Amino acid sequence: MELERHEYDVVVVGAGGAGLRAAIEAHENGARTAVVCKSLLGKAHTVMAEGGIAAAMANLYPEDNWRVHFRDTMRGGKMLNHWRMAQLHAQEAPDRVRELEDWGALFDRTADGLISQRDFGGHRYARLAHVGDRTGLELIRTLQQRTVALGIDVYMECTVTRLLTDDDGVTGAFGYWRESGRFVAWQAPSVVLATGGIGKSYKVTSNSWEYTGDGHSLALQAGATLVNMEFVQFHPTGMVWPPSVRGILVTESVRGDGGVLKNSAGNRFMFDYIPDFFRKETAETEDEADRWYDDKKNNRRPPELLPRDEVARAINSEVKAGRGTPHGGVFLDIASRRSAEYIRKRLPSMYHQFKELAEVDITAEAMEVGPTCHYVMGGVEVDPDTEAARVPGLFAAGEVAGGMHGSNRLGGNSLSDLLVFGRRAGLAAAEHALKRIDRIALPDEALADAARAALAPFDREGGENPYAVQHDLQQTMHDLVGIIRTAPEMEQALERIAALKERVANLSVEGHRQYNPGWHLALDLPHMLVVSECIARAALERQESRGGHTRDDFPATDAEWARTNLVCSRAPDGSVALTRQPLPQMPGELAEIFEEVS
Amino acid sequence: MTYAASFRVWRGDVTGGDLQDFTVDVNEGEVVLDVIHRLQATQAGDLAVRWNCKAGKCGSCSAEINGRPRLMCMTRMSTFGEGDTVTVTPLRTFPVIRDLVTDVSYNYDKAAQIPAFNPRPREADGSHRMQQVDVERSQEFRKCIECFLCQDTCHVIRDHEGNKGAFAGPRYLIRLAELDMHPLDVTDRRDAAQDDFGLGYCNITKCCSEVCPEGIHLTDNGIIPLKERVVDRRFDPLTWLGSKIGRRPKD
């Protein structure tokens, strides 16, 4: 078998914010480090993040500190977050933002010349370091340029199809060059998964083709566990018209900067959807809400800036009740509330996006928006301090890791998550590698087996088209495991997923191995299916509604489930096994924070 | 609303290829990339194309549409008549890999050669203070999504393969301008801009600015000011004399 082979201490899979930050840290700790990514460097999904990086830097509000950020994060996640991850995240995010400046990032400034911070849903103070509404681009470019400056090896347009392990843990990874279809293997005692999310299993999503859940699936196959997979975030504001752009993200900054949601009758309906859990901190009248933008001390937050799960559910209800827009969304209006100049300055890429793709001038008219699959809170179960999975040598950071965001992620907490835990994963991976470096090998049989599996779709004649199977999976998840869920629908989804698995085993692809998207999709589909199964199984099991998981048949939160996590693992027969696990309990000194900050 | 459009798509690889004709459905509001995806799903499963965000933010789906360098995800089908044939070809300046995918490693090689960002130390309180007006000049260039359409259209390399060694292309000239204007950076790259990255090859025809999907004024705001800074340094006799006798600072 023709095979290109490499040896490293640390191999990072994924070149978004978490992957690049992990690689930088591993390299700086002396590890021979490689980054493997499916797209060109600088194109990862992080580039699409718009609003900002949440960090309690207190540049605008001296009252802000990590304890308030910690509290906001835990409450946003309906207290299901791993407390230790939420703590580390809140404590370390400001330093992670500052070091980006040392690497060339240029954030928008305050009048004092410090990094400016903007308001976002669920955050008590203006906290998001940003660059207009293209913060993700700034983050990825900064980390990309740092990676290049350090001379870290990057394998671009290269897909990992399998993790390699022995009895003592990770030994490397196997994949193919997308360009040539040729195989490549990396021998390494530490592998960091930073592969992002799962949105491509859904029909309406803000996610790119890369979001196939491959990291989740690779981890599961290697013997690691996934936690909180039932929690999928539907971002409240995706584009709804024209159909071809349905799902493309409309940043929460529109609301953070003063935009409001209205139904077809012109009412600011969010005032009708304030849950008791957030009533004390949410404005009751439009006047109070409008005053809050300038005076946060004496007024409470507008309900448009409730956490995303609340807003998405409210929009869904308005549309179902017949108060939606002509294209099945609601109106997001900033045109009537802010000057055209302000809008173009603060939201340049939203202005551009609507102008180019929908022929809508957002400085003059309202946008039509509706929920779109955006983020998976669930992911690889990791140790909070080191991001180590249950398999020695395997680490996970960013969206592919679970626990940090509980049942719902606050906007802005993703970019900071990438930086904080990307760095920690890179550090721990480098340390682990030192202990194992001379004691691993890649057996030929495992490599040959991985190659055979990858080529199987070419060997079958007359099988099914992978694009048709993908379409049916997306429709299934959209219809049956979407924003509002019921037991019969999810049972039906599991039956359909089982049928889709059989179809995937019979796929065939046309053409040859050189840059062949049909073949690539055929190899992605098993990942998408196993992740979809995890989501559906966990969602069926959790008989309550919490955060990104809403059960029509169990609409309330439940005290027992408040203490319980669901963990997916791979059963010996290859199916997904589900176990209940007690939620880690936070120490008393952290619990006190919820008393002291009201 | 749906109509059958005529598409001609270049298919082939490094050994050669040709334009292939397709008739394909187009729906309201669609962009060229939607139609390419429909071709993949229904008629040509192995049609090679790069894309990621489909929202004009990642700069992956660059191609030439009716001969013009564009992002496929930001080119609406409504800009063509229903009877028009839409021709999609790969970026001509870079070697083709397969179909619409080209080898853009030239760009990554140039990026790696640019002397890295080098900041002044932080202030005593651990922060960097910069005024908004000062960061905005470099921010314009940091909007770049690296779609490489400016590189594709630049005649210095589009028409003269031999210049690729000496000339980094507009994308990297504005990267140099960005670093030059960065309030924190302390490295002087003016000699390198001229000697290593071929600033002098640019004769400011502004083709790059015209095709930039981000509307960056590459020539007016980046390349021309950089040329002026280089000229100040090199050809001002007083500056030259001052630097020789050591009485005048580097700038």
Image (cartoon, rainbow, N blue to C red):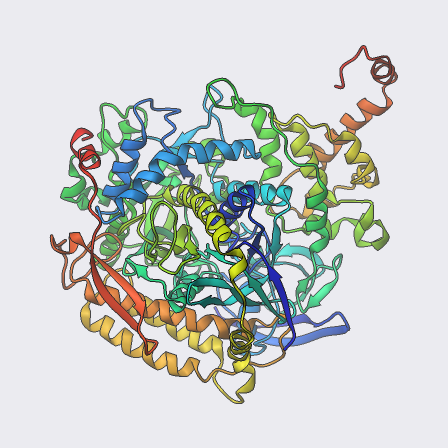
In which quarter of the view is residue B179 placed? Answer: top right
Residue sitting nearer the eye, A328 or B236: B236
Residue sitting nearer the eye, A315 or B113: B113
The residue at 68%/55% (across/down) is B69
Q: Is residue A73 left or right of residue A284?
A: right
Judge whether residue A578 can be spotted in this image: yes
Q: Is residue A559 left or right of residue A337?
A: left
Relative to A586, does residue B66 appear above or below in the rendering? below
Q: Position of residue A143 (x, y in %)?
A: 55, 43
Query: Which residue is farthest bottom?
Result: A462
Relative to A3, does residue A227 appear above or below in the rendering? above
Q: Position of residue A406 (x, y in %)?
A: 27, 50
Q: Is residue B94 left or right of residue A118?
A: right
Q: How many marks?
A: 0
Q: Position of residue A522 (x, y in %)?
A: 49, 75
Q: Position of residue A101 (x, y in %)?
A: 53, 32
- Quadrant the C terminus of chain A occupies: top left
The residue at 76%/56% (across/down) is B93
Judge whether residue A257 can be spotted in this image: no
In which quarter of the view is residue A7 placed? Answer: bottom right
Q: Is residue A423 left or right of residue A547?
A: right
- Quadrant the N terminus of chain A occupies: bottom right
